[in-house]
Amino acid sequence: MVEIVLGIAVFVLAIAVVGLFAMMGELSSQVAGAAQPARLDQAAAPDHLHPVPEARIGAAPAKWPAELAAIRDAERAHVLVFSTTCTTCARIASGETGPLDLPSPMAIVVSTPRAAAATAFLESHPMITNYPHLVDVGGSWLSSNFEISISPSVLVFGNGQLLSAHTFTAASTLTQLPAAAEPAAKATG
Amino acid sequence: MLAYAHDAGRVALAVILLLGGAAKLLSPRPLATLLHQVYGWARPAGVAAARAVAALELTAAFLLAGGWLVAAGLTVTGLVGAGIAGFTVIAMRRGATAPCGCFGESSGRPIGVRNLLAGAALLAGAVGLLVLPGAGTAEPALLLPLTALIALVAVMVRDRARLLAPFRRHFEGFPAGPEVS
């Protein structure tokens, strides 16, 4: 009986270890994907926008936060998504990669695990406060409405509907946005 | 002799199911992304589906390795294999490009013929053991840890590059340079 209990324990332990390896693989594939553009950036090579495959294109939230009211009503609007735990977001939000040149209306959503971290992030990067901005604790508004859980990313809206979503690694990349957004919207919608 | 074949077959299937089930249970996102691409399912539904498949696979692995309700375990294994093969065909027809993350694989390779063959092999293995006369004789106290051990060795060999990467630069020699006498 003891042998069987030990066997079951080892079996469960193997499940945990194999699962951890799988999580490590998933994490490293995401980090590798994010690190590659960063290396390109360091080598002064051009950055690109990358579509967010899991984004819920065409989604229109039933409820908009007051901070994003202008986005809801505009024919074409942009939302930048930053996270307080993301190093690239901090570089972009500090203006290190260039100004945030997007046509108005534009807003910023700061996704954060804790509200206090968002406050510190806003204090460290005052450029964000030049725009309407929303603190999304836990990323709940973004993920529940658009399945967006990656940052930095830029969301393109038309009349309150998500038209396209892209990741980026430098503010200068945002100049590619109109050309990149329209095919994505057509392809999925 | 047939008893050995039964035991070896059960362990082989249990290892494959353990690898696939444990990976999907704790890392369901790749399959959820693929389900979104193929069926348009929202992320939470995809994650729930991936974990449901993982639960089935782990249950089957446990039954096969433990030697309890072997016929039921083999039936579930066959269903999982058929499901993998069928889903792969649908995904390939719809031009899915996302990796399925099957068996914890993280190479980023899109779902394809390899997944189809893996599903077919699971199905064939389960059917083969069901029709093979006789039964296994090994004790659960032996087969459960043996299955776990083989799965652990398999995952460590497969992911050895990732395991060793942090240590490599510390243990590799310095680049060759002029000798100092």
Image: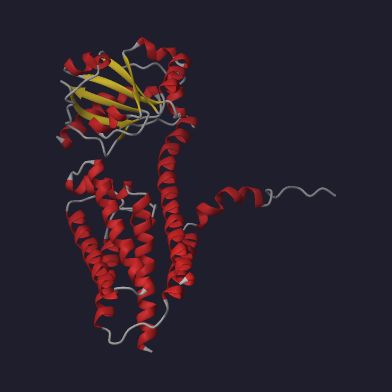
Q: Which quarter of the picture shows residue B92? A: bottom left
Vertical arrangement, residue A62 with respect to residue B145, above or below:
above
- At a point 18% along the width and 31% down the height, the residue shown is A185
- Most distant residue in the front direction: A1
Residue B19 drawn at (x, y percent) = 38, 61
- At a point 25% along the width and 79% down the height, the residue shown is B130
- Most distant residue in the bottom direction: B1
Vertical arrangement, residue B66 with respect to residue A157, above or below:
below
Left or right of A120? Residue B57 is left
Q: Which quarter of the picture shows residue A188? A: top left
Q: Could you tell me which quadrant the C terminus of chain A lies in?
A: top left
Q: Nearer the viewer, residue A168 or A1?
A: A1
Q: Which of A75 and A181 is in front in this view?
A: A75
* Residue A115 appears in the figure: yes
Left or right of B35? Residue B154 is right
Q: Which of A88 and A183 is in front in this view?
A: A88
How many numbered circles are shown? 0
Residue B24 drawn at (x, y percent) = 34, 53
Left or right of A156? Residue B1 is right
* Residue A95 appears in the figure: no
Q: Could you tell me which quadrant the N terminus of chain A lies in?
A: bottom left
- Most distant residue in the top direction: A130
The structure's colour scheme is: secondary structure
Q: Which of B165 and B83 is in front in this view?
A: B83
Residue B132 drawn at (x, y percent) = 27, 84
Vertical arrangement, residue A34 with respect to residue B175, above or below:
above
Vertical arrangement, residue B65 with respect to residue A37, above or below:
below
Residue A2 drawn at (x, y percent) = 48, 70
